[in-house]
Amino acid sequence: MQKLSPSPKQVEFNANTFELSNGLTIIHHYLPATPVVVADIWVKAGAIAEPEAWSGMAHFLEHMIFKGSPNVMVGEFDWLIESTGGIANAATSYDYAHFYLTTAATHFEDTLPCLADILLRANIPDDEFIREREVVIEEIHSSHDDPDFIGYQALCQNAYEYHPYRRSILGEKELLLEHTPNQMRCFHRTHYQPENMSIVIVGGIEQSQALALVNDHFSQFSARSECPPTKIAVEPPVVSIRRQELYLPRIEQSRLLMAWICPGSESLQSAIALDLIALILTGGRSSGLVRELREEKQIVIDIDCSLSLQKDSSMFSVGALLETEDLAIVEQMICDRLNRLHHHLIPAAEIASAKRQLINDYIFSTETPSQLASIYGFYNIVATAADSALYPQIISQLQPEQLQAIAQRYLSPEHYAVTVLKPSNQ
């Protein structure tokens, strides 16, 4: 039986948010029917927090957090999580780093204090620093064998001229080799402080118990330090067509990547509208660019577009896999499609179909404790956790004229960054 989606008006922010006197934010959502608890700790300490010479430090620190603290030996946290049947991991992006664990509610009181200790009081031992740096460098080497990573990173550098979003989250090998344990300790003690941290707890634990655990174990932070200052420049709009061409071995088809700088989370409605436009363009076989370029003309193997929502300047991108001889015509046809958005309203039926799909996708992405924790944490970094519940409402209220105005403002067929990857034998 097909699952029915609730009306967008029924999508509410069901979590409770608290801010402690030290600036620490706690987001709690009690799900009494589940025996699982997720703790997801989000820190405003992503790649944009790095001084330029410390590129890669945020991601490297993510690795080093798991190397223990004064009260937790190396490997002890991993052993505790695995022995209790839980899962723990971490990720770093531009605007954040986050560390999460999923465990049975009966084990939460044992596992959360251990996670808190390694986060707040990371040792960063010299010997482990040297060993783990080799792991990070190997990760960089592996990424250089991935044409999709190479293409996306090149596109970021092409689209962003000034903002740290242009840098690789992994960093550069040459700079990583210059990093020292003391620099990392400085970065940690500067940014892993309560005002930069949101603790999201979702699942089968009542609010009073969750708050008590946080108060008990997230109160003793490391002594503050101060990194070299970072300056984040406002990214100006692209006012020309910036072209970039790379030749790569071991690829058989070319890749066409196009990008437009768009508003960040300060203009959430515009960003969400661009999400809707992306789905209308490449959300399925009947969507505009897929139907025209892949299904009818068969001049692309695949095509997709998406919005990367970020705190400062988001990026709307289109990517196509195709033969080299079709690069110019496909780029022109993408620009023609954008030009059509500027001068003609999107048919109501296309908008309605895309709205249903996005709202359903949103609702289905809030079904598990880990999904909810991730959405709350991400939004609390780029906006506020409560804003996450606005997504279906904003989508449902967007009108054709609004979508046209946003396309006219941000998706110019004459001003964009384009990166092309070609097989090196061509």
Image: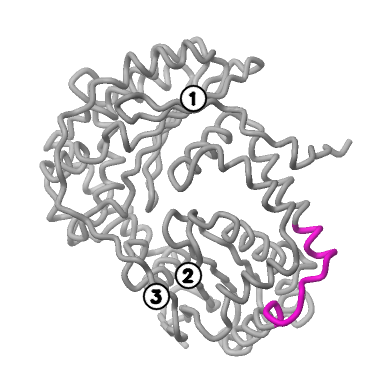
- Residue at x 62%, y 20% (from the top left corner): 31
Q: CA distance from mark 1 to mark 2?
A: 34 Å
Residue 246 placed where, x, y %? 40, 80
Of label 3 and label 2, which has the lower sequence position? 3
Along the horizontal axis of the image, is 229 left or right of 297?
left
Residue at the outermost right position: 1
* Residue, disc 2: 261
Residue 334 placed where, x, y %? 64, 80
Q: Amino acid at mark 2?
A: Ile
* Residue, disc 3: 158
Report the span colored magenta. 340-354
Q: Which label lies toward us, 3 or 1? A: 1
Along the horizontal axis of the image, is 80 left or right of 209?
left
- Residue at x 28%, y 49% (from the top left corner): 136
* Residue, disc 1: 201
Q: Of residues 147 and 2, which is closer to you in this image?
A: 2
Dot 1: within a 10 Å radius of its alpha carbon, few (fewer than 14), some, or many (20 or more) residues?
many
- Where is the N terminus found, in terms of image quarters? top right
Q: CA distance from mark 3 to mark 1?
A: 38 Å
Q: Of residues 77 and 40, which is closer to you in this image?
A: 40
Q: Of residues 75 and 92, which is closer to you in this image?
A: 92
Q: Which label lies toward us, 3 or 2? A: 2
Residue 374 placed where, x, y %? 52, 37
Of label 3 and label 1, which has the lower sequence position? 3
Q: Of residues 12 and 2, which is closer to you in this image?
A: 12
> Quadrant of residue 117 in the image?
top left
Q: CA distance from mark 3 to mark 2?
A: 11 Å
